[in-house]
Amino acid sequence: MDLKQFKNTGADFKIKNAATTFDPGLDRQGIKNELATTMDKIKQEQRKLFADRRYGIIVVLQAMDAAGKDSLISHVFSQVNPGGLRVANFKRPSTTELSHDFLWRITNQLPERGEIGILNRSHYEDVLVSKVHPQLIVNANLPGIDTLDDVTPELFEQRYHDINNYESYLTHNGFVILKFFLHISKEEQKQRFLARIERPEKNWKFEKADIAERRYWDDYQRAYQDAIRATSSKENPWYIIPADDKWTSRLIVAKIMVKRIRQLNLQFPVTEADQKKLMADALKILESEK
């Protein structure tokens, strides 16, 4: 599988031309088998990441509703040691969060070196949802933003600039950022919403807000296109993942994860001579016990 086809590094991204489906050349069972193998590789790389302690991995997941973010997390990272994994879910900002800058709540949830941190939604909500619903910006008590007329394109351009600088800062400090946009078609989203209504075991997933937000589909598509164009770079590219089939999207994300982490050339620490002596002494004590 050529993973380069999913990477976007420039400002020429057109969301209408981005595929929501992909044929990996495998049947369903083949995809599941390949995913299981790749998940085991993530597990092994995470062990080295944790032992190495020089890098941290930040996984940014963005998508329209019902694109499969939650199930992707539960599948792709199910083999990773929970001690080295963090998952942060971001909803509408709280009163406390609105009292800080828009990146504050993200910084509070970042992983430590040696960890994989997953941002289920992220700082990009502040140039996506806030762009579709600018009243959220007005409610944030920003200086000079008192009415909807004050929410100008220049404000979002400044936020794109801030995001790029923020991500560069994290990268320069040893944090690898992997940004995934799970790209689902409008028709597939409809089918998943219908399943939530018609299938009793999925009823718990249904939220009235999901249907309300669907009315803004075109607005969200433009907001995603603008954000991806403005924040894709060679250093921190976006990966556009076809998401109409959940198993395929999980496999693509998992393979990109393995490839990127392996580029770090992580190693288990070399045991020093003093430590080896301590271990040898401990071994003698243990072996002498009856």
Image: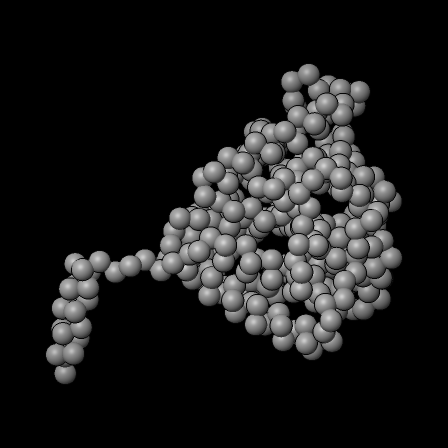
- Identify the residue shown where x is 69% and y is 78%: 29
Is residue 141 visible in this depiction of the protein?
Answer: yes
Q: Is residue 52 left or right of residue 207?
A: left
Is residue 129 visible in this depiction of the protein?
Answer: no
Residue 78 placement: quadrant: bottom right
- Identify the residue shown where x is 65% and y is 58%: 3
Q: Residue furthest bottom?
A: 290
Q: Is residue 114 left or right of residue 211?
A: left
* Between 49 and 86, the one nearer to me in the picture: 49
**Can you say whether 25 is above or below 230 in the image?**
below
Where in the figure is residue 216, as x and y percent of width and height? Answer: 84, 42
Where in the figure is residue 260, as x and y percent of width and height? Answer: 54, 54
- Identify the residue shown where x is 47% and y is 38%: 172
* Between 65 and 260, the one nearer to me in the picture: 260
**Can you say whether 210 is above or below 139 in the image?**
below
Residue 129 placement: quadrant: top right
Residue 250 placement: quadrant: bottom right
